[in-house]
Each structure stands twice: as structure tokens, then as C-alpha cells.
Amino acid sequence: MDISRLTTEARNAKTMTLDSMSVHEFATVMNREDQSVAASVSLALQDIEAAISTIIRCFDQGGRLFYIGAGTSGRLGVLDAAECVPTFGIDPEMVQGLIAGGLKAMTVAVEGAEDDVQLGAEDLKARGLSGTDTVVGIAASGRTPYVIGGLDYARQVGAATISLACNENAEISRHAGISIEVPVGPEVLSGSTRLKAGTAQKLVLNMLSTGAMIGIGKVYENLMVDVRPTNEKLVERAKRIIQEATHCDEEAAEAAFEASDHDVKLSIVMILTGLSRQDASVQLRKAGGFISRLVSSED
């Protein structure tokens, strides 16, 4: 595809005088352009919902989620994968982000990496990709060879495939079982897809990972009950979550937090059911990790 035909590469008629705008004018026009992104994402909700359901099925079968991309797209995938670990208390292997050129490319451009079709396949092969896994290929342009190579390899091994692009009729859409297209139009700064396209990708990735984690019991009500309290701030947040979920006082939350060996979810179950740590753990496993299922069965 001729890159000039991509809307993400087109010039924005509203910002043709960007270099002569006042700071106020620039901030105003950029803010207005950014406000259109969420509306564009809303038009892709049906495909986003299908993608979330696919990832949940993958997790239920013991599979993993891989994000694969280059440049900003790859960095956003790595970011979302990394943030799933403390937020939902998962093993780092469960959600992984792959970027063309490796982790060095998070801070420095690796020349030619995104143009290597085989590299995408090789990176997934090195992670032992299997038919129970899901691969989300991310490309603002919708044509990145590295991503296409990864999606094609994923299909070969029987993994579920999802594409995320910011152009209509994107090339990567033809290489995935589920295609999510969020055309955001020309960027404020022509071709700088870290802007609206990057924002759109972040919004969609937030939905995919959060929705999937909700679907496997990592959330109770609207609380992140599997959060890992790895620092002082998170320890205090963990205790507040226990209080919010059980309506107990600070002293009871503290006692349960210590008795559960700093396991927020177990603390909540122990308080709500009166069970010991060991019995609460057993019952939670039977409920598939869902506090709501366990509590409703107790009623």
C-alpha cells in the first residue's frame, strides 16, 4: 500500500499553520482533535468485545496473551503487559509485550526491525507460542511487516489472532481472526502516530486487558482485588480495598491482611465468610477465583 494513501499520514487541514500558532491556539486545537479519539473507539466496540471474549477463553484454557508491534505501537503493548502484573497480580509470562528490535527499541529506534517479516514470527517462536495463546498485532498504519509476520505465524500454530490498526481496510486486518480498526484521521503533527493513533491504541489496550482480567475473576465489584502490594503506597491501597469490599474497619482489615500473608483477595473472602486462610483459599479455587461467585454461594 502506498503510504500516502493512509489517513494517519495525511495532513490535517485544521493544523496547516501549526508553526505559527500561539501556545494557546496549539493546545486548543490539539485538545479538540484528541476529543475525537474516544468517539472513534466507540465505533469499534463490537470488535473490541469479540476480542475481549477471545482473550478470556484463552486465559481459561491456560493460554497467554501476546502484544506485538513496532515503534509506539510496540511500546504501548509492552507498557500494557507490564502494568498487568502489579494491577492484577499475574505472572509476567501471562501477558507479554513484544517490540520489533527487542527491549532496546523501547528507548532507541532499531533501524529496519519493523520491516522484517520473519522477525515477528521468530520472536513469537522464541516465546513458545502455542494454539492456546492469543496474539494482538498492533500497527497504527495497519501495514507493519513485523506485525504481519507475527500474526501469520500465530495463525499457523493455531493461536487466536487480533489486529489493531488506526486506518480503515488495514492490511493487518486480513491477517487476523478479529480485526479492530479505529481510524482517527490525520494527526495534528502530520504522520506523528504517537498522538491520536497512540491514544486510540492505549484506550483499546486498556479495554482488552482490563476486560479480560474482569472475565477471569481478577476484579470484585470495581476493585482490583489481586493487586500486588509491593510498596508502601500499594500496601495502603490494599488495605483500603479490603475495607471497601467488606465494609470493615481499619483494624479488621489490617488483621486479615496479615493473616492472609498480604493476599488482598483472601483477606476479603476471610472477612466476608469467616473462613480460615486455608479454607478460604480452597473455596476461592472452587469458585474459579471469583469472589462474587463464592459469596453468592454462601447466601
Image (cartoon, grey):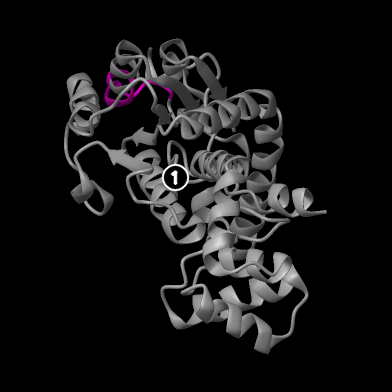
Which residue does the image show at 28% across and 27% down from the upper left? Answer: 129
Looking at the magenta stretch, what is its main secondary structure? helix
- Amino acid type at circle 1 is Arg
Which residue does the image show at 50% across and 75% down from the upper left? Answer: 234
Picture quadrant of residue 128: top left
Quadrant of image for the C terminus: bottom right
Quadrant of image for the N terminus: top left
Which residue does the image show at 43% across and 23% down from the upper left? Answer: 142
Q: Is residue 148 magenta?
A: yes
Residue 212 at least partly seen: yes
Q: Name the residue beneath numbered marker 1.
A: 194
Start and end of the magenta stretch? 142-149
Against 183, residue 278 (above or below) is: below
Which residue does the image show at 59% across and 61% down from the upper left? Answer: 280
Q: Nearer the viewer, residue 23 or 97?
A: 97
Residue 185 at least partly seen: no
Q: Nearer the viewer, residue 206 or 184?
A: 206
**Helix, strand or loop for disc 1:** loop
Crowding at mark 1 (Cα within 10 Å: few <14, some 14-19, many 20+): some
Q: Nearer the viewer, residue 296 or 73?
A: 296
Q: Is residue 108 magenta?
A: no
Q: Can you give x and y, in whole percent of width and height, for residue 41 in the image?
A: 65, 34
Picture quadrant of residue 271: bottom right
Q: Can you give x and y, in whole percent of width and height, for residue 248 in the image?
A: 75, 79
Would you say 144 lies left or right of 226 here? left
Would you say 286 lies left or right of 230 here? right
Q: Can you give x and y, in whole percent of width and height, for residue 282 in the image?
A: 54, 54
